Image: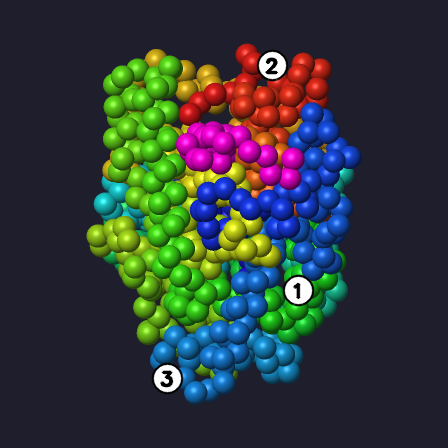
Amino acid sequence: MHAITLPSKLRFICLIIGGFWLVSCQSGSKESSQRDILAEVVDTTVSPKDDFFKYAVGTWLKNNPIPASESAWGIGSLVQDETYKRLRTISEESAKGSTSAGSSEQKIGDFWFTGMDSVSIEKQGINPIKADLDRIAAIKDINGVLNEVALQHTYGIGTLFGAYIFQDEKNSEEQALHLYQGGLGLPDRDYYFNTDTRTANIRKEYKAHLQRMFKLLGNDEATATQNAEKVYALEEKLAKNSRKIEALRDPYKNYNKMDLAALEKLAPSMKFKDLFTAMQTPQVKSAIVGQPEFYTAVENLLKTTPIDTWKAYLNWHFVSSFASELSSPFAKEDFYFYRTVLRGVKEMKPRWKRVLDSEEQLLGDALGQLFIKNYYSEKTKKRYEELVKNIFSVYKDRIEKSDWMSDSTKKKALLKLSTVMAKVSYPDKWKDFSSLDIKRDSYVQNIIRANKWWYTYTTNKIGKPVDKTEWDMTPQTYNAYYNPSNNEIVLPAAIFFIAGFADEQLDDAIIYAYAGGSTIGHEITHGFDDQGRQFDEKGNLKDWWTKKDAEEYTKRAKGIIEQFDNYVVLDSMHVRGEATQGENIADLGGVVLGLEAFKKTEQYKSGKKISGFTPLQRYFLGYALAWMGHTRDEALANRIMTDVHAPGFLRVNGPVVNIDEFYEAFNIKPGDKMYRAPEKRVKIW
């Protein structure tokens, strides 16, 4: 299964590559014989004045190469491996057959059974989706094309365009259909046009991949080549009319609410009323169009593209969406392009991990209930709820003392901060999967049934009150997010897990840097980054800033854009400062908030060294630890082109050079590589 690119609004979700895995907030630390993770990973052959990231975690990087089955490897990978083992235990126990029909355990067990039954998967080959391919082959006209596009959306396939259900940005109490650009086989529109050697080679490989996939579908050599060329040409036209990721950041420019009449005028050939009915959303009377020019282009393509080209395109997107779960010829070909070519991965993960990835995506809440029951404590939950309160308190102080905001804007910022809802560890209410039918007949069919269930679950929200208690991540997810429409931060339990160290070995410097800075403070700051600041305390897109304060904010944000634009990561590839500004602002805010909260602890006040490091040094080393890891060049290039996050090492070196205390901690002076002149240091929150 390939993840569909989410619209800009949903990119407030923060990818945790380094992550953190703590379970305690104890003050102080016992030195002597105890292990100290900071001392174990630091590389004293590197000066913190030259490259702080490599100094902080360089020894670990040298001793932990990226496994052949991974595109990146870091401290978060260790937590994920532990989570895999726990979810495997849950799945294997559930698959033993002693569960009651319809229970979460039965669904987990049967899904696991079919996913692990490689003999049946190989024997079935293409048969699980043959009826779908036959249906596509029978298409005669453009109405048939649109009906198939609609049907594929109900299968969870983002064919031709993106369709998402989430809150109306200007009315957070209402769920709305959002129509976005989409329908590409490459990760982003720039892959179709960038002229550098790396991207040009990916295009060449993609065309060859298309051709091989059509051969696997039974095409002869010539027909497969023709179909590949048709699909690529069609996708290239869609890409040409798609916005760059930088242009997706402006919530106003990507908000165009239209009723049915306006939609029909925008793209009459799409016949939106009939399309929505075929998409099983007949209740839709209006939609928010993100990129209207994309739908103008689709209108032209519907008028000018031959039916056979559309059929090839529909075939390709259908089989590609399920290739990794089909028999090995399809799975291996899919892996070669999407994992080896695009991300440099040398070998597949073992089947059990791949099945768990699918299981987590489709039955995550069902797994989550058992996960929390077996592996998480209420004591830990309360401990981190308290830490969240500490970080909120610091943010309140910093807004009140801000020297660049007017009193009227401060008042509204404080109101918004006071209404941020913090969801910590796991939800109070779990999703009900009782209507989802999981059987032991076919792995791919189980995935299709689950995709359809999720589609119905989501589209049923249209026109109904927003459930603001709902979580969009499972508790075992190694990630966190801020949702502007709910004005909430969501911190799943997995981010508080420990990997290899006992509670008493983690001092407050680590706790406040990892949990306080890299995640809690980071997510809160998203409510006030370049996108989040445009939403009010009720989650609505509404300007609450004075003109002067908005201009000052933009000026300060420009500083962080320029800073990251100047980082060369790979070959001639630069970080995209504008695209990544939200995450970079949140990283900087998180480090500052965690530090200010840490200053209130007894450890900081005592000034006592641990392993030769002062409390202030330990704080910055602890922050670097949260992003400890490295990435293959191919995956790094992919990330620069598609991700709104900077690479992990720059999520350390980037923000710390803007913080005065960093210079104090490591005696950074003019002339040092890590030195940034005071007038260039970005200060926002």
| Residue under the point 22% across and 54% down | 464
In the picture, the quarter occupied by the C terminus is top left
Residue denoted by label 2: 677
Q: Residues within 10 Å of mark 1 (few under 14, many from 20)?
A: some
Mark 3 element type: loop
Residue segment shown in magenta: 587-612
Mark 2 element type: loop
Callout in the foreground (2, 1): 2
Residue denoted by label 3: 101
Q: Residues within 10 Å of mark 2 (few under 14, many from 20)?
A: few
Give percent across and percent down for residue 35.
63, 50
Residue denoted by label 1: 349
Asked if marks 2 and 3 touch (Cβ < 8 Å), the reply is: no
Mark 1 element type: loop
Picture quadrant of residue 660: top right
Give percent across and percent down for residue 510.
53, 42
Give percent across and percent down for residue 249.
45, 33
Give the residue type at disc 1: Lys
